[in-house]
Structures are given as C-alpha cells and as structure tokens.
Amino acid sequence: MLRKIYIAVLLVAVGTLAGIYILRRTTPAVNTTGSPSPTANQIQTIKLLIDSGDGNPLSFTLPFSVSSTPFSLLNDTVQTNNWEISTKQYDFGVFVQSLLGKPSTADMSWIYFINGKSGSVAADKALLQPADVVEWKYTKPF
C-alpha cells in the first residue's frame, strides 16, 4: 500500500514538472524593460556618428543586423558615399589607417566608441545591439 502511494506521488510530481516545462516553452517572453518590443514592421536601427574633428560630425541611422560591428557600419557607409578609407588587417582585427583624408598617427587616430565607451576589441570583432550608438572619432589616442 505504501508503495502505491509513493508511485502515485511520484507520477503527480513528474506530471507537474512536465506541465511546467511545456508551459514555459510555449509561453511568449514578457518585455520587462518598459520599451516597446519590436514588431515585424519595426526596423531595428543603430546610429553611426563620424566625427573628424571639424565641428560637423556626420550622423547616419542604419539598419541593425546580428552581424553588425563598428567597422562593418563604417565600411558600408564609406562604400555607399564613395569616401576613401585605408585599413590594415592584423591578427587581432582591423585597424583604420586613414579615413576622410585624415591618417591615424601617434598624435591623432580613428577610435570607435559604443554608447560613449571606447572599444575594448578590434572594430570588426565588437558585435552591436539594436539602438546602439557607434561613434568614430578622430582624436588623440589614450
């Protein structure tokens, strides 16, 4: 008799856990950020700023892709606008040697920032998120 009760309790527990598992897999995720969730009709974007130090930064709103990097945004924008860019590929990633006629030197260099923070990896290795702000600045290296 005790064995039958034990088996019944075990079956109820397994059934309950299976039900919870199924419900969790079929219940849509809830947005807790307070921001509206993107729908199929909303295009997620990233903002690109290019500041060559002349007081007139260029601003672009570009579509987000899961493979977006600071360098891919810059390179696509450069190609679209037929600007000149010179890069060098290293083992760690790409380095912008010159952009818009301004060379990277020991005194001034092209450095990227994501949401106000300078990059910690090469520009072609940093994956972006929707709504990120990427800024390429011609500034003193630090």
Image (cartoon, rainbow, N blue to C red):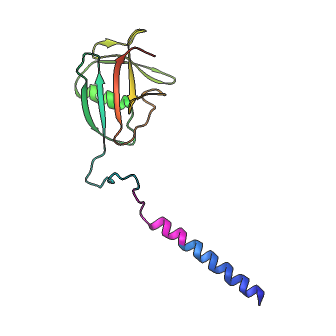
- Residue 39 appears in which quarter of the rendering? bottom left
Count of picture labels: 0
In the picture provided, is 139 more to the left or to the right than 4?
A: left
- Write down the region rendered in magenta: 20-31
Residue at left offset 67%, top offset 81%: 9
Q: Quadrant of residue 77?
A: top left
The outermost residue toward the front is 34
Establish if 42 lies above or below 26: above
Question: Where the N terminus falls, by quadrant?
Answer: bottom right
Quarter location, residue 110: top left
Does residue 30 show up magenta in the picture?
Answer: yes
Where residue 121 sits in the image (x, y, percent)? 48, 28
Q: As displayed, is residue 14 above or below residue 109?
A: below
Left or right, residue 82 beside residue 13: left
* Residue 87 drawn above or below residue 20: above
Q: Is residue 84 magenta?
A: no
Observer-nearest of 131 and 66: 131
Residue 50 at x, y percent in the picture: 29, 24
16 lies left or right of 88:
right
Farthest-out residue, bottom: 1
User: Residue 33 at x, y = what percent?
Assistant: 39, 52
Where is residue 138 drawn, in percent x and y? 34, 17
